[in-house]
């Protein structure tokens, strides 16, 4: 959280180019330096893999800061109570 506060002026998820100068490391390298190996392996990697459908090695440190900034601003993931197929089932039933 300190890192997102420290770089808050450059972290606008709607203007990611403003964080380009922060984009020096891939996500694992950046997070190992900030939070350590265990937090990366057991906490952050699974969350990012399931949320963004990407391996941490394919993401950058700046992406992580942007995502955290977005979440801190009030964004929340939501899903249908009856599962992700609810929308397509409902649409198909109404055709």
Image (cartoon, grey):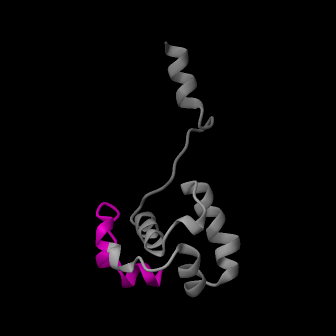
Residue 15 counted in the magenta span = yes
Residue 32 counted in the magenta span = no
- Measured from the top left, where is residue 2 in percent x and y? 45, 84
Residue at 30 percent of width and 76 percent of height: 10
Report the predominant secondary structure element of the magenta stretch.
Answer: helix
In terms of image quadrants, where is residue 19? Answer: bottom left
Residue at 54 percent of width and 23 percent of height: 90
- Measured from the top left, where is residue 1 in percent x and y? 48, 79
Residue at 60 percent of width and 38 percent of height: 81
Residue 83 in the image: above or below residue 33:
above
Residue 44 located left or right of residue 77? right
Residue at 45 percent of width and 64 percent of height: 71
Residue 62 located left or right of residue 45? left
Residue 66 in the image: above or below residue 86:
below
In terms of image quadrants, where is residue 69? Answer: bottom left
- Measured from the top left, where is residue 53 in percent x and y? 58, 54
Residue 2 in the image: above or below residue 92:
below
Boundaries of the magenta span: 1-18
Count the numbered circles shown.
0
The residue lying toward the viewer, choosing from 85 and 22, is 22
In terms of image quadrants, where is residue 89? Answer: top right
The residue most toward the top is 95
């Amino acid at each position: 959280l300190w890192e997102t506060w420290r770089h808050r002026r450059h972290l606008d998820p709607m203007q990611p180019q403003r964080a380009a100068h922060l984009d020096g490391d891939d996500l694992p390298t950046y997070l190992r330096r900030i939070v350590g190996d265990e937090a990366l392996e057991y906490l952050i990697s699974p969350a990012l893999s399931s949320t963004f459908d990407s391996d941490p090695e394919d993401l950058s440190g700046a992406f992580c800061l942007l995502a955290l900034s977005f979440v801190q601003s009030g964004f929340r993931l939501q899903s249908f109570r009856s599962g992700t197929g609810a929308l397509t089932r409902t649409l198909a039933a109404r055709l």
